[in-house]
Image: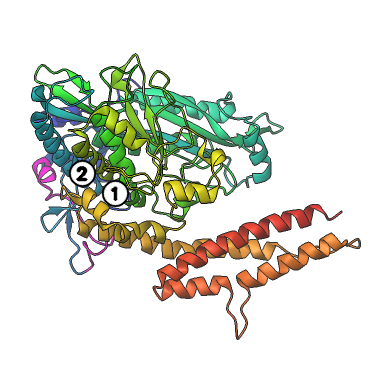
Amino acid sequence: MAELLYTIKANTPKEEIIRQLREHPEIKFVSLIGIDLAGNDTDEKIPVRIFLKDIDEFYAGRAVQTDGSSVVLPGIATLNNAKVDMPVDPSVNWFVDYNFENYDPSTNRPVGTLRIPSFLIHEGKRVDSRAILTDTLINVKKELVDLLHLHHEIDGLEVNGRDVIDISFTSATELEFWVKTPLEEAIVEEMSASQVMQEQYWQRTHGAVRCALEQSLIELDKYGLKVEMGHKEVGGLKAQIDESGHLTHVCEQLEIDWQFDEAVQAADNEIIVRTVVKEIFRANGLEVNFKAKPMIGLAGNGEHTHIGIAAVTAEGKAYNLFAAQNPAQDYMSAIGYGALMGLLKNYEVINPFVSSTNDSLNRLKPGFEAPVCIVTSLGHTPEIPSRNRTILVSLIRDLENPMATRFELRACNPYSNIYLVLAAAYSAVLDGIKMAATRTTAELLAEISKDAGADGFYLEKDRAYRSEEDVYEAFDDAERNRLFGTPPATVWENMEAFTKYPDKTKIITSGGALNDRLIKSFREGALLRWKIELISRIIPEQREIVRRAKQIKTEFVTDQDAYNWNKISTIRVELAKDSIDAKCLFTRLINALNAGEFDTASKLQVEIYHKIEELKALYDAYEKNII
């Protein structure tokens, strides 16, 4: 439907917005998108006639208000001080979300809702994720321009800093997701074998999955996102055909990529992509799952996040600040080296925003191409760009196109709060750039390549930060932890980084947009969700796993059967069976969480996870030996 209006472009004047909406009466509603600290986006239905009548009030934030019970702002928007104003943001694109199951009879077009990115204001202060990123970039831009004017001849940089008048922050995300037939259980063992044998990766799609993928790519292009690719990912299983010729037992992993944009716009784009994809696949009779680790034992969903910075001169020419002036002789400019080291050195306090849920940490396990170590790869020589998939931050380079030089943060997942991830990341990048501005690229290359235990002028002495090896194959767990730091195993461990690394926390809060109050609120919300999910979802699911591990009655019992069952029985009791004198692991974890003993609860969660995995492996062996 070429006549539909899909996007109202950034900075469109109010009069033009009014004209466009009046020309498109199928757009019946307006919805303001405020992003709370958990990354949730608000959605409501406001008749367009109200928006047109009170448009100035919407811009001022007086037309729509929410309260503390509607958004995740713990310790800020409380029940006794709950009012939150929602001014619209005219500096980004506004998207029209069409409902193709509800047609307007007067126009014979689908009913549309204009979704407008907005801010959340409490007591006169912006407290939402979009505002944190927006205000962070304003501060980083100012500091970078001042630094470039002061140190105008930076080693390896093509542009003279005196000529720079503006900074452009570019970002992009890659969205992975699982697709399945509703209400059908996945066969994990069979899909694991398919994954190892790479039977699905970049294979041809079929039937409803093919239709939904193609429709999604076409629809997203109508929003101006410039889709680059859609393809199968590593996970999945070949579907079956029923008697009527339809595909059943669909369970596949897909990825969609689209073009980069300015950082705030890139984060906004992701919301419309998730919405469109979910609705189109649902219309084709398929469920979409964006969880980081929908099925334990199979590939999780990543969302590799790309980070770039360009300088803009008075003539309007853009220069990539990370790119080397001579890319065949050096990996990056001094600014590029500094930015990458800032990201790596301060990653412990970026990681809580990247992985704030049980699900996200389940994805970050060795063996699934998900990064667990704070380490980068540059490539064996500058002439050969690296494609090491086992590291946290990739350096992406194209020797023929210096504007393509950027960093790829590989730990994010589709439910990472990308606004907060980018805000913390760009603040960390700035810290490294300040250090690198007066250094040579040779000095900086030596610093990022130093061995663990070697003194450095910026990076920590006891850590290594670069490896050209497969870090899963070249090092065992103990070596990886010694060289690159021990990754957090639970949400509690990850959130403790803000306390454990106060100097690094100061780095990401130095601009003031992301401050201690907001971090405290974010942390409190993440820990509450961690606690409730463990008590109300994860432990009940694990209890069912224990209950299903029942003794199998058979006439032919071997000593192996008896041995396996005795071990299984012992683990079942340890996990789920209380006595008067001794409480099981599940009970102890629930008690610790309710008592606020989060460090104890964290250790119990890790112990339970290992016990459950041991139980599943033992019961699988036990069941297979029964004939």
Q: Which residues are magenta?
A: 55-79
**534 horizontally vs 69: left or right:** right
Which secondary structure is most common in the magenta stretch? loop
- The image shows residue 472 at horizontal and vertical percentages of 54, 41
Q: Nearer the viewer, residue 46 or 528?
A: 528
Horizontal arrangement in the rendering, residue 405 relative to residue 387 (left or right): left
Name, please, the residue furthest toward the front: 454
Do the CB atoms of the residues marked 1 and 2 lie less than 8 Å apart?
A: yes
- Secondary element at tag 2: loop
The label shown at residue 118 is 2
**Residue 483 place in picture, x, y as percent:** 44, 46
Q: Residue 60 lies in magenta, yes or no? A: yes
The three-letter amino acid code for the residue at tag 2 is Ser
Residue at 80% from the left image edge and 62% from the top image edge: 552
Q: Can you give x and y, in whole percent of width and height, for residue 521 in the image?
A: 26, 60
- Closest to the observer: 212 or 71? 71
Separation of marks 1 and 2 at Cα, in angstroms: 9 Å
Residue 229 is labelled as none
Q: Where is mark 1, residue-wise?
A: 42
Residue 267, how many percent across, how many down?
30, 38
